[in-house]
Image: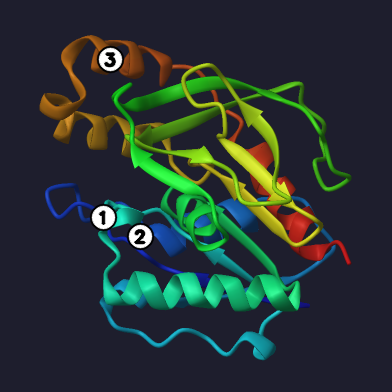
Amino acid sequence: MKRVAILQTGVNNPKMSASYPDYPSMFRSLIGHAQTTCIIELISFPIMEGSSLPEINKFDGFLITGSASGVYERTIWMMSLFEFIREVHKKKKKIAGFCFGHQAIAVALGGKVIKSDKGWGVGIRKHFVSNTKNWMKPEKKDLELIYMHQDQVIKLPDSAVAFSGDEFCPFSAFYIGEHILSMQGHPEFSADFAQDLIALRSHNIGQKKVNIALESLSKPHDGPIVGQWIVNFFCNT
């Protein structure tokens, strides 16, 4: 059995339905549906609400969720998280980050994140896949994932290898060695959740992008495949 700590860095928008699961529950569902003989125990830590960070040596890995916050805000809990990421990296413990988590890993390890002047990346977007690792099974030449971001990684940390992206978001995913997995997309989101979140942010996103994004969400996405990749990543020794 592998013990993985979920570092919860965001909460659902309070204007959304209370019936939606929170971020840790979304990842529990995603990981729980992946096919595996490896059992992963997931324990969440709401660090943005003041929870202490977990003891590194008591876990096999760590997963950082999304957030409405920006890594450039440099709040106290973010600075503690960045230092934690550096310690995890130094010990070569496994850590995965998604959306805000992706950006936090990049910044903590020397990369750069900005609020992009390209505007929002929303809805299901297709990004190529290259530089594959053995945990990327089943194999995909491209990934269609749900995205919800305005911030972007524009400079990778040293030794990071980009493995997914497009012209709009070149560094949508990277890895470092065998112990860091970092992705801008939201494999854990459902189409319904994304649709409601887009509706709440439509004024900021812009109606043209909103219409394209909502139309894209009518088709399946590869979140479950990335869910299997996450399980493979944490379970591969």
Q: Secondary structure at mark 3?
A: helix
Q: Residues within 10 Å of mark 2 (few under 14, many from 20)?
A: some
Q: Residue at label 2?
A: 22
Q: Amino acid at mark 1?
A: Asn
Q: Amino acid at mark 2?
A: Asp
Q: Residues within 10 Å of mark 1 (few under 14, many from 20)?
A: some
Q: Nearer the viewer, residue 52 or 176?
A: 176
What is the x, y in percent for residue 214?
A: 32, 18
Separation of disc 2 and disc 3 at Cα? 26 Å
Q: Quadrant of residue 105?
A: bottom right
The answer to whether the residue labelled 1 contacts the one labelled 2, judged by CB atoms less than 8 Å apart, is: yes
Q: Is residue 226 above or below residue 214?
A: below
What is the x, y in percent for residue 6?
A: 51, 70
Q: How is the image coloured?
A: rainbow
State which tag comes first along the sequence, 1 or 2: 1
Specify the quadrant that holds the C terminus: bottom right
